[in-house]
Amino acid sequence: MDESATGNSARDLLEVIWEAFEDRAWDHLVTLYHPDALLTTMASGEEPLSPSASVAQFKRATEDPFYHVTVSAIIPIDPNACLALGRIRFRHPQGGLTDSERYWLYIFKDRLLWRGSVHRTRQGAMAAYKAFADVPSYRFHAN
């Protein structure tokens, strides 16, 4: 995707992020994150990570050929937020394999990923979105 053709919507911004992830363009991916971004990943659990720590986890995870993430739908929430519905396949650290559906919540600020989290259900993702939306600092306009 040509970034110059990218619009301001959360969906457009997420498409650029997913392309960088799929291309394993780690140096580019980290530039798409807001400097104050906090992101949770499957590996981090509830622990929010910085942009560089998140990308480092993605790099480690994708070294395993079993690891795979697909997105089947992007669901707009507001001009700055969207959900991605997809599947993730990974190995458990204590052994075993998982292939399951997940919802990823993405919130953008200044056209950069500002908050991100992963959830088992759409209801869980929307509860997280509502928690962010109730915080006064979330109320900003897309640039």
Image (spheres, rainbow, N blue to C red):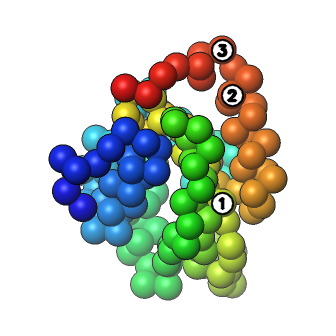
Which residue corresponds to mark 2? 133
Asked whether the residues under the numbered discs 1 and 2 touch, taking CB atoms below 8 Å apart as contact, a structural biologist would say no
Q: Earlier in the sequence, mark 3 or mark 1?
A: 1
Q: Is residue 11 above or below residue 35?
A: below
Which residue corresponds to mark 3? 136
Q: Residues within 10 Å of mark 3 (few under 14, many from 20)?
A: few
Residue under the point 37% across and 34% down:
111
Which of the image's four quarters has the N terminus? bottom left
Residue 139 percent coordinates (x, y): 59, 19
Q: Amino acid at mark 1?
A: Tyr
Which of the image's four quarters has the C terminus? top left
Tell me how far mark 3 sits from mark 1, CA to CA.
24 Å
Instruction: Tell me if residue 62 can be seen.
Output: yes
Residue 21 percent coordinates (x, y): 36, 62
Q: Amino acid at mark 2?
A: Ala
Q: How many numbered markers are drawn? A: 3
Tell me how far mark 1 sits from mark 2, CA to CA.
18 Å
Please tell me in which quadrant of the rendered image residue 31 appears.
top left
Q: Residues within 10 Å of mark 1 (few under 14, many from 20)?
A: many
- Which element carries disc 2, helix, strand or loop? helix
Q: Residues within 10 Å of mark 2 (few under 14, many from 20)?
A: some
72 displayed left or right of 35: right
Residue under the point 33% across and 54% down:
16
Q: Amino acid at mark 3?
A: Pro
- Which element carries disc 3, helix, strand or loop? helix
Tell me how far mark 2 sits from mark 3, CA to CA.
7 Å
Which residue corresponds to mark 1? 103
70 displayed left or right of 52: right
95 displayed left or right of 41: right
Q: Earlier in the sequence, mark 1 or mark 2?
A: 1
- Which element carries disc 1, helix, strand or loop? strand
